[in-house]
Image (cartoon, rainbow, N blue to C red):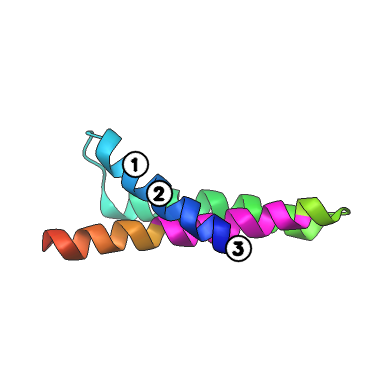
Protein backbone atom coordinates (compact mmCIF):
# COMPACT_ATOMS: atom_id res chain seq x y z
CA UNK A 1 0.00 0.00 0.00
CA UNK A 2 2.94 2.29 0.61
CA UNK A 3 4.06 1.83 -2.98
CA UNK A 4 0.51 2.53 -4.18
CA UNK A 5 0.35 5.77 -2.21
CA UNK A 6 3.73 6.88 -3.58
CA UNK A 7 2.69 6.07 -7.15
CA UNK A 8 -0.58 7.92 -6.56
CA UNK A 9 1.28 11.05 -5.49
CA UNK A 10 3.49 10.86 -8.59
CA UNK A 11 0.49 10.31 -10.87
CA UNK A 12 -1.34 13.21 -9.22
CA UNK A 13 1.54 15.59 -9.82
CA UNK A 14 2.12 14.29 -13.35
CA UNK A 15 -1.53 14.55 -14.37
CA UNK A 16 -1.72 18.07 -12.97
CA UNK A 17 1.18 19.09 -15.19
CA UNK A 18 -0.19 17.32 -18.27
CA UNK A 19 -3.90 18.15 -18.05
CA UNK A 20 -4.77 21.61 -19.34
CA UNK A 21 -8.53 21.22 -19.71
CA UNK A 22 -10.66 22.85 -16.98
CA UNK A 23 -12.45 20.28 -14.86
CA UNK A 24 -15.10 20.74 -12.20
CA UNK A 25 -13.82 19.90 -8.72
CA UNK A 26 -16.56 17.38 -7.99
CA UNK A 27 -15.84 15.55 -11.25
CA UNK A 28 -12.13 15.50 -10.48
CA UNK A 29 -12.74 14.06 -6.99
CA UNK A 30 -15.10 11.44 -8.41
CA UNK A 31 -12.54 10.46 -11.04
CA UNK A 32 -9.56 10.42 -8.69
CA UNK A 33 -11.22 8.61 -5.79
CA UNK A 34 -13.97 6.69 -7.54
CA UNK A 35 -12.26 4.79 -10.32
CA UNK A 36 -9.30 3.33 -8.39
CA UNK A 37 -11.43 2.66 -5.30
CA UNK A 38 -14.11 0.75 -7.17
CA UNK A 39 -11.54 -1.24 -9.13
CA UNK A 40 -9.52 -1.97 -5.98
CA UNK A 41 -12.54 -3.05 -3.95
CA UNK A 42 -13.75 -5.34 -6.72
CA UNK A 43 -10.33 -6.96 -6.93
CA UNK A 44 -10.12 -7.42 -3.16
CA UNK A 45 -13.62 -8.90 -2.90
CA UNK A 46 -13.32 -11.36 -5.80
CA UNK A 47 -9.67 -12.29 -5.39
CA UNK A 48 -8.74 -15.92 -5.14
CA UNK A 49 -4.99 -15.35 -5.32
CA UNK A 50 -2.73 -13.36 -3.07
CA UNK A 51 -1.32 -11.16 -5.84
CA UNK A 52 -4.84 -10.10 -6.90
CA UNK A 53 -5.53 -8.95 -3.34
CA UNK A 54 -2.23 -7.05 -3.35
CA UNK A 55 -3.16 -5.40 -6.66
CA UNK A 56 -6.52 -4.35 -5.18
CA UNK A 57 -4.81 -2.84 -2.13
CA UNK A 58 -2.37 -1.07 -4.48
CA UNK A 59 -5.26 0.49 -6.41
CA UNK A 60 -7.00 1.61 -3.21
CA UNK A 61 -3.83 3.29 -1.98
CA UNK A 62 -3.19 4.80 -5.42
CA UNK A 63 -6.50 6.68 -5.28
CA UNK A 64 -5.76 8.09 -1.83
CA UNK A 65 -2.24 9.15 -2.81
CA UNK A 66 -3.55 10.82 -5.96
CA UNK A 67 -6.20 12.68 -3.99
CA UNK A 68 -3.61 13.75 -1.40
CA UNK A 69 -1.37 15.16 -4.12
CA UNK A 70 -4.23 17.13 -5.67
CA UNK A 71 -5.27 18.48 -2.26
CA UNK A 72 -1.69 19.52 -1.48
CA UNK A 73 -1.40 21.29 -4.83
CA UNK A 74 -4.60 23.24 -4.13
CA UNK A 75 -3.36 24.25 -0.67
CA UNK A 76 0.00 25.43 -1.99
CA UNK A 77 -1.65 27.33 -4.86
CA UNK A 78 -3.87 29.15 -2.37
CA UNK A 79 -7.14 28.10 -3.95
Q: At which x and y percent is residue 32? A: 43, 51
> Which residue is depicted at the point 41% across and 45% down?
11
> Which residue is depicted at the point 60% across and 63% down?
1
**Residue 29 or 53: which is nearer the viewer?**
53
Q: At which x and y percent is residue 49? A: 87, 53
Left or right: 74 in relation to 57: left
Nearest to N terminus: mark 3 or mark 2: 3
Q: At which x and y percent is residue 67? A: 39, 59
Residue under label 1, please give it. Answer: 14
- Camera sees residue 42: no
Q: Are marks 2 and 1 in contact (CB under 8 Å)?
A: yes
What secondary structure do most residues of the magenta stretch adopt?
helix
Nearest to N terminus: mark 1 or mark 3: 3
Q: At which x and y percent is residue 46? A: 81, 54
- Read off the magenta span: 53-66
Q: Quadrant of residue 73?
A: bottom left
> Which residue is depicted at the point 23% across and 34% down?
21
- Image quarter (top left, top right, bottom left or bottom right) of the C terminus: bottom left
- Camera sees residue 54: yes
> Which residue is depicted at the point 55% across and 56% down?
4
- Is residue 2 covered in magenta? no
Answer above or below: position of 12 versus 79: above
Residue under label 3, please give it. Answer: 1
Q: Secondary structure at mark 2?
A: helix
Q: Secondary structure at mark 3?
A: loop
Amino acid sequence: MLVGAAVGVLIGIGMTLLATVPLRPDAAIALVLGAPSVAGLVLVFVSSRRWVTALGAFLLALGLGWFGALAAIQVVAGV
